Amino acid sequence: MRDDEMFRLNVDLQAAFMQYVIARPEILDQLPDDFRLVILSDDDPALSWRNLELLKEQGDADKPIVIVRMRTQELVNLMTHPLQIFVPIAA
C-alpha cells in the first residue's frame, strides 16, 4: 500500500469517526482527555497492519491508546451499526 493511499484511507476513517462522535457526543465521556487514536479496518487488513506499525514507530508512551474498529470498503450507517471502541482502563 502506498503512503498516499494509506493517508487518504485514514483521513476518510477519521472523518467517519468524527461524524460518529458528533452524532453521539456522550462517547467523549468514556474517552481519555488526551489519547492516540488507532483505527483498525475490519475489511482491510493491510491498512490495519500499517496503522499498527505506525503506532509502534510513532507511539507516545505517555498517552493512552484508543482503538476503533470499523469498515473501510463499504459505507455503513454508524447509527445502526455502531463502531467498536476500545479504551484503556485504569489499572
Image (spheres, rainbow, N blue to C red):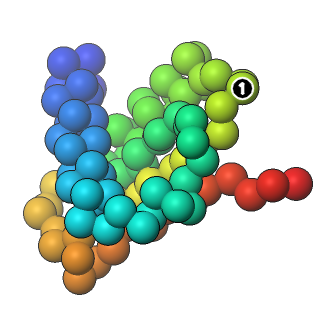
Residue 8 image-quadrant placement: top left
Read off the residue under disc 1: 62
Total tally of numbered discs in the picture: 1
In the displayed structure, 57 sits above or below 69; it is above
In the image as oriented, which residue stretches furthest toward the left? Answer: 75
Which secondary structure lies at badge 1? loop
Label 1 crowd bin: few (<14), some (14–19), many (20+), radius 10 Å: few
Q: Quadrant of the N terminus?
A: top left
Q: Residue at 56% of width from left, 36% of height from top?
A: 34
Q: Quadrant of the C terminus?
A: bottom right
Residue 59 place in picture, x, y as percent: 60, 23
Q: Residue at 65% of width from left, 31% of height from top?
A: 63
In the displayed structure, 60 sits above or below 32; it is above
Residue 20 place in picture, x, y as percent: 27, 61
Residue 80 image-quadrant placement: bottom left
Residue 64 place in picture, x, y as percent: 66, 39
In the displayed structure, 25 sits above or below 12; it is below
Front one among 62 and 2: 62
- In the image: residue 63, left or right of residue 52: right
Q: In the image, what residue type sits under mark 1? A: Asp
- In the image: residue 80, left or right of residue 34: left
Residue 56 place in picture, x, y as percent: 61, 25
In the image as oriented, which residue stretches furthest toward the right? Answer: 91
Answer whether residue 36 is visible to the viewer in this image: yes
Answer whether residue 2 is visible to the viewer in this image: no
- In the image: residue 65, left or right of residue 52: right
